[in-house]
Image (cartoon, rainbow, N blue to C red):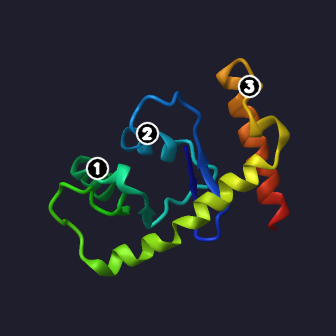
Amino acid sequence: MAIADSHGLPLAVRVTSASPNESTLVEATLAERHVADLPKRLIGDKAYDSDLLDERLQQDQGIELIAPNRRKRKKTQDGRPLRRSIRRWKIERLFAWLKNFRRLSSRWERYCSNFHAMVQLGCALILLRHL
């Protein structure tokens, strides 16, 4: 899981198994961020649509969660903040940049800690390229 800024540069990266829901991994990923400041807004897809996550991010860290509602759920957000979710392509661009590194395009590493180190190295190289 990765969190990027408004330019698509990595702020936080966390490597876990594929089975847990993304909404349960957000706070742990924010705890492993590369920068000291927290983002003001967090834009996610429909998997982030959770009242509990929204409450915890707003109260504990002061982060506004912007996520479209799931299909069978009543609307909890108005349209103005949801227009920001159009910019989600920037996180996809970050993943495309990470896939340019050969060790990250397919997971060759056996251990999670080694793969996490490679992802962090890739993020550091992306940040150095954009300075």
**Residue 7, horizontal then vertical, whole percent:** 64, 70
Q: Relative to residue 70, is residue 5 drawn left or right?
A: right
The CA distance from mark 2 to mark 1 is 13 Å
**Residue 13, horizontal then vertical, whole percent:** 60, 44
Mark positioned earlier in the residue sequence (2 or 1): 2
Say the numbered circle drawn on residue 79. none
Q: State yes or no: discs 3 and 1 in contact (Cβ < 8 Å).
A: no
Q: Is residue 5 above or below residue 126?
A: below
Q: Is residue 111 above or below residue 105?
A: above
The CA distance from mark 3 to mark 1 is 31 Å
Residue that label 3 marks: 114
Q: Residue at x 28, y 50 (%)?
A: 56
Residue that label 2 marks: 25
Q: Relative to residue 69, is residue 118 drawn left or right?
A: right
Q: Residues within 10 Å of mark 2 (few under 14, many from 20)?
A: some
Q: Residue at x 35, y 76 (%)?
A: 81
Q: Is residue 67 above or below residue 80?
A: above
Judge depth for marks 2 and 1 and give the one in front. 2
Helix, strand or loop at disc 3? helix
Q: Quadrant of the C terminus?
A: bottom right
Q: Relative to residue 62, is residue 34 drawn left or right?
A: right
**Residue 52, horizontal then vertical, whole percent:** 23, 47
Mark positioned earlier in the residue sequence (3 or 2): 2
Q: Residue at x 69, y 18 (%)?
A: 111
